[in-house]
Amino acid sequence: MTHLMRSIALSAALLAVSPAVASANCYADYKAKQDNPLKLHYGVVQLRGACNAQSAQSEIASRLAPSGWTLLNVMSVFGPEGLQQRKANAGPYYLRF
């Protein structure tokens, strides 16, 4: 295998892996509610799918629903650099869902 072919193969392998790596380091913060009695919470989740607000909306809603929570809104989508500043505010809902 020539040097050029090895470089092309390596580049292709890195491109194939990069979406998985990107989503593994993608997080979102959100607000949710439960009714009867009304409860609200702020939380942080690690996203498994695409790293954007639109995908986060459906992913988080489907993960909250089995526990009786309704997603109100996705506040932001961010990388690992934003985790520590949100940890205290999320409390028990930090990476819970």
Image (cartoon, rainbow, N blue to C red):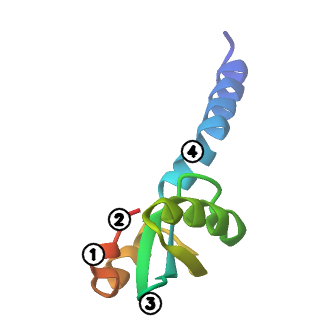
Density class for disc 3 (Cα within 10 Å; few <14, some 14-19, many ≥20) is: few
Are discs 1 and 2 less than 8 Å apart at CB? yes
Of discs 4 and 1, which sits in the foreground?
Answer: 1
Density class for disc 2 (Cα within 10 Å; few <14, some 14-19, many ≥20) is: few
Q: Amino acid at mark 4?
A: Ala
Q: Residue at x 32, y 78 (%)?
A: 84
Cα gap from disc 1 to disc 2, whole angstroms: 7 Å
Q: Amino acid at mark 1?
A: Pro
Q: Position of residue 48 (x, y in %)?
A: 54, 52
Please report whichever mark, 4 or 1, sits nearer to the chain's N-terminal start: 4
Residue 52 located left or right of residue 22: right
Please report whichever mark, 4 or 3, sits nearer to the chain's N-terminal start: 4
Are discs 4 and 3 less than 8 Å apart at CB? no
Cα gap from disc 4 to disc 3, whole angstroms: 37 Å
Density class for disc 4 (Cα within 10 Å; few <14, some 14-19, many ≥20) is: few
Please name the residue that numbered disc 3 is placed on: 38
Q: Residue at x 67, y 39 (%)?
A: 15
Q: Position of residue 21 (x, y in %)?
A: 53, 48
Q: Nearer the viewer, residue 58 or 12?
A: 58
Please name the residue that numbered disc 2 is placed on: 96
Q: Secondary structure at mark 2?
A: loop
Give residue 92's mark: 1
Please report whichever mark, 1 or 3, sits nearer to the chain's N-terminal start: 3
Residue 86 located left or right of residue 72: left
Q: Secondary structure at mark 4?
A: helix
